[in-house]
Image (cartoon, rainbow, N blue to C red):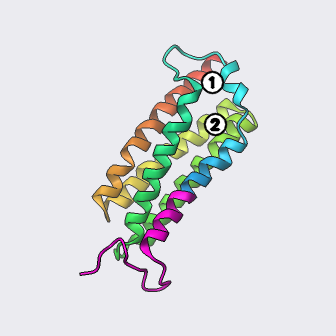
Amino acid sequence: MTDPSIARDRATHVPSWLVLIGFVLLCQLAGGLGAVATDPGLYRELERPTWAPPGWLFGPVWLFLYTTMGIAAWLVWKSEAPTRNRALIAFGIQLALNALWTPVFFGVPSLGGGLVVIALLNVAILVTTIELGRISQLAAWLLVPYASWVGFATALNAKLWLLN
């Protein structure tokens, strides 16, 4: 039996660990692109609910979440499941919505537009978790913290929109 850490994709002959790094970097890049569009002063200037986390917390949380997202995508990529491509397409769609939220919320800025994007993102995460779960239970569980955080962020986005 082949060690999965050194396994290669049959079609591309790319080492599995390199693809893992690629998925994690892709997810981090999605977050990084959003960070470029962020006005760091905007969050501080908004009237926030008492339960809003401090601005410094978002970076470490997203670093962790983007890493677990990349691992989840990699687990599905390395499978030979017939629905692998469908699951990875769902993953790509939710990642694109994730990357879109920050420029809409902070870049435009539009708190209402951000709320629309993040509502769509919640649906996309649910679909992605279901699709990944059909292939790898671990991949689906790795998305649970992400789904939870985005659910919390949705409530925060809604409250910010109402307050401001």
Q: Is residue 152 above or below residue 127?
A: above
Q: Is residue 11 above or below residue 103?
A: below
Report the residue at 65% width, 31% height from top. Answer: 112
Q: Is residue 8 left or right of residue 114?
A: left
Report the residue at 41% width, 49% height from top. Answer: 126
Determine which of the numbered discs, if any, sits on residue 161 in the image. Answer: 1
Report the residue at 60% width, 38% height from top. Answer: 116
Q: Is residue 78 above or below residue 139?
A: below
Amino acid type shown at disc 2: Gly
Report the residue at 61% width, 52% height from top. Answer: 30
Magenta stretch: includes residue 20: yes
What segment carries the magenta color?
A: 1-25
Magenta stretch: includes residue 17: yes
Q: What residue is pinned by disc 2?
A: 114
Mark 2 element type: helix
User: Where, quadrant-wise, is the N terminus in this rendering?
Assistant: bottom left
Q: Residues within 10 Å of mark 1 (few under 14, many from 20)?
A: some
User: Where, quadrant-wise, is the C terminus in this rendering?
Assistant: top right
